Amino acid sequence: MAALDLIKSLSIVTPSKIILLVIDGVGGLPRPGTGGTELETAKTLNLDRLAGTGMCGLSNPIGPGITPGSSPGHLGLFGYDPVAYNIGRGVLEAVGIDFPLEPGDVVARGNFCTIDEAGRITDRRAGRISTDKCVELSRLLNGMSIGNAKVLVEPAKDYRFIGVFRGTGLSAELADSDPQRTGVPPLAIAALAPAAEETARIANEFAKKAKEILAGHYPANMALLRGFSQRPDWPTVSEIYKLTPAAVASYPMYRGLARLVGMNTLSTGGTVAEEFETLAKNYKDYDFFFVHIKGADAAGEDGDFDRKVAVIEEIDRALPVLSGLQPDVLVVTGDHSTPAMLKAHSWHPVPVLLYSRWCRPDNLSKFSESACRTGGLGRISATDIMPLAMAHALKLNKFGA
Amino acid sequence: MAALDLIKSLSIVTPSKIILLVIDGVGGLPRPGTGGTELETAKTLNLDRLAGTGMCGLSNPIGPGITPGSSPGHLGLFGYDPVAYNIGRGVLEAVGIDFPLEPGDVVARGNFCTIDEAGRITDRRAGRISTDKCVELSRLLNGMSIGNAKVLVEPAKDYRFIGVFRGTGLSAELADSDPQRTGVPPLAIAALAPAAEETARIANEFAKKAKEILAGHYPANMALLRGFSQRPDWPTVSEIYKLTPAAVASYPMYRGLARLVGMNTLSTGGTVAEEFETLAKNYKDYDFFFVHIKGADAAGEDGDFDRKVAVIEEIDRALPVLSGLQPDVLVVTGDHSTPAMLKAHSWHPVPVLLYSRWCRPDNLSKFSESACRTGGLGRISATDIMPLAMAHALKLNKFGA
């Protein structure tokens, strides 16, 4: 946290502009027999040219050997130490559906579940009901007024929803109602601090009413709550970096994360070309753009090496839309690696490319994991990327005299 | 601070000798069209030979993206974490003119300023009076005895001076008299802690007398004080490293910084050859030498690429004076980069060369930013340099059994 305080004390407003292009899961592993990773296999003339005039390196999202989830992966890229800046589970679920949490909201993850006649849980996931069913049932529970709180219920995926308690003076110091096992009834929600007693009463009243409302909807005849948390009161991107930030992301999770650190989220189509076009249209109104491309990660998780190559090539073809805007700093990187060979996020360090006229250039001929290994950015932490981008945009004052 | 404790617990006295040659602002950026930085453009046969038998790397003075001032840049080179070891503004000004602060001295930065008949500040810099005028006025204020304190006033540059309160039991817990704006009178100097009340009384009495003395010296008819601070009580280079250290520096700021960490400062002429000669003459009396060459930074700040190249070449020509002494460790580096293209200090990592017979040699053919990128020292923090120098001088015991 001290690191953000230092940056905050040095950052200044200038007309210069920064684009942070995040190719989700960009880092990979070689396909056996070929020796080339997804990025090395892709034909990326525009990225290669940028690497030739800019600087490259490899970044660790969390630390050597640590595989990040999407949320810590992005927080690191935004400069927030992802271990120190931890998001509560309820908030994370809300972020995942880009639900506009307000300050003070207490949010819990919810599961629709099955209980028997004695009230004992028989299935914590209600037979994995469909998302459609989840939407229908969430609507039944949504909008209760209990005490001085309003309870909002918003469907997520399958049997999952979020419960948002909105009112004044609420506290998230609450234990779960979900006992995390079957054969026992849901737990009464206990206050973990005296200040949370009224919120516990409200949450228990909600659970009671939910049970009544859901009684006829077997197998989803009850709701469990866990991970009560509040939107963290973190310094925003505007406060730390004095930037006017915009996020271009079509997936809710990434819009939610961007919103959590105070970025404006722009409406956008979901293709690479559409996202870049959205940025171009809004270019004059902001001085920082976070652009998120999901496809490479999705292909990696599917183990589809060729599709991941194709997504990277699609980004490369569209890149002139961004570089043509002549941003003062253009960073291309990922939030983590997702090697198709692993079909999962991984701990492998992530290629980073930083272009600016104030780079000490590497003269590399390719944007790739192996070229990045020899690049002038060296081996960095993901949290170093924003300070480096700020420096190259001449947005950081000197430290000390 | 923990890092210094570790080194302190391991360091031993040996006959071996270390020279730390600091080429201020040595790191650069390529001159457009040529592709070479100042260091890469300079003909540096001696440095290149040293790089061939030693090790090279790149160091971050503070952290990625952070541009250091001279003071944190040097503290890092001396092994002190420059963010943790912070110097008060008054002390920094005193250091800048190499004023010999004594333990317990309370020092403030001073401005000569202009006040109107109602006592309101109309110009915080007294029309930027000349340094000559500043010397003359400082003399008028110098030497007051107030309470049990003596007040020393020493001119700095232009309208700036330092006020040093010397006596027993003084405290620097004082608020500024400088309101940092015009149209209001100077503030009474407030004690920020009960222990500072007597010092506040003395400082206010000084301000009152200064007003009387300066009354006829419009536009410099008043003095403002700010940044009250005391010489930090840090472990010295002798305490941490058990070295007998000498500084060879012709600029007051660097002599002051060296003094602050307990180095002896040697009288010297100001050319590169003269500084090296000073070191050679005193070689037998010390086992650690900090040699500071200012010219490269000054040329960089002026945007004079060719002059910076010339200074580096001048150093290279004189280098045999140092290497001929056959020090056990010779480090050549800078406190930060000062690219002529930027005309300012910058955040770019700084080339480091460490020669010792105990190096694992890199076999590089050139001392340059791009060669350093591939060197065996890797990417280090400036605070790593002293431990590495100590190790290669066989001055650090094993840690643990």
Image (cartoon, coloured by chain):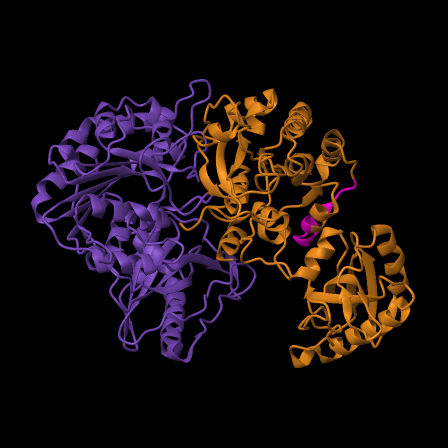
Chain colours: A orange, B purple
Give the residue at x 23% y 60%: B9
Quarter residue B53 falls in = top left
Q: Position of residue A265 (x, y in %)?
A: 74, 45
Quarter residue A20 falls in = top right
Is residue B157 in view?
no
Q: Which residues are magenta?
A: A257-267
Q: Position of residue B102 (x, y in %)?
A: 24, 64
Looking at the image, which is closer to me, B62 or B278? B62
Q: Position of residue B111 (x, y in %)?
A: 41, 57
Say if the magenta span includes residue A137: no
Is residue B174 in view?
yes
Q: Quadrant of the C terminus of chain B?
A: bottom left
Give the residue at x 18% y 31%: B319
Q: Quadrant of the N terminus of chain B?
A: bottom left
In the depicted structure, whether residue B62 falls above or below residue B154:
above
With A299 as the anchor, is B149 left or right in this view?
A: left
Q: Position of residue B209 (x, y in %)?
A: 37, 69
Looking at the image, which is closer to me, A206 or B97? A206
In the depicted structure, whether residue A349 falls above or below residue B242:
above
With A242 as the anchor, is A359 left or right in this view?
A: left
Quarter residue B377 falls in = top left
In the depicted structure, whether residue A131 falls above or below residue A377:
below
Most extreme residue toward the right is A216
Looking at the image, which is closer to me, B97 or B246? B246
